[in-house]
Image (spheres, rainbow, N blue to C red):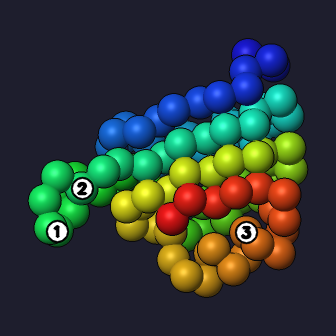
Amino acid sequence: MSSLRSLYLRWCCQVQDFGLQHLFGMRSLRLLSLAAECCSSCCVHPGCPLLTTTGLSGLIQLQELEELELTNCPGATTELFKYYSQHLPHCMVIE
């Protein structure tokens, strides 16, 4: 999997912080999606609900990442997005 460029983990509600650690060595990864879409006015099915801000912050190790989608991911906070803008300046982070 050293050449994997895109990984879509949308709706993978069992992904946890520990699981993300296995991605940190994937230097060719350019796109990572941990998102889910709301199916009504309130988000009934959040994307990756077991991921925390701490676990998500480790994604800065993926320095070649160009796009990170965290739509409706409960662990994605305003502070985390600021952190990403400092440490992943070339990555488009989708809230």
**Which circle marks residue 42 in the picture?**
1
* Label 2 close to label 3 by CB (< 8 Å): no
Q: Earlier in the sequence, mark 1 or mark 3?
A: 1
How far from the left and from the top, in percent, is residue 3?
A: 80, 17
* Label 2 close to label 1 by CB (< 8 Å): yes
Q: Is residue 18 visible?
A: no
How far from the left and from the top, in percent, is residue 20?
A: 60, 44
3D distance between C-alphas at marks 2 and 3: 24 Å
Disc 1 residue type (three-letter)? Cys
Disc 2 residue type (three-letter)? Cys
Dot 2 corresponds to which residue?
A: 38
3D distance between C-alphas at marks 1 and 3: 26 Å
**Which circle marks residue 84 in the picture?**
3
How far from the left and from the top, in percent, is residue 56?
A: 60, 60
Q: Considering only vertical position in the picture, is 65 above or below 50?
A: above
Q: Is residue 68 visible?
A: yes
**Residue under the point 75% across and 37% down:** 30
Q: What is the quadrant of residue 27 in the picture? A: top right
**Residue under the point 76% across and 72% down:** 85
3D distance between C-alphas at marks 2 and 1: 7 Å
Q: Residues within 10 Å of mark 1 (few under 14, many from 20)?
A: few
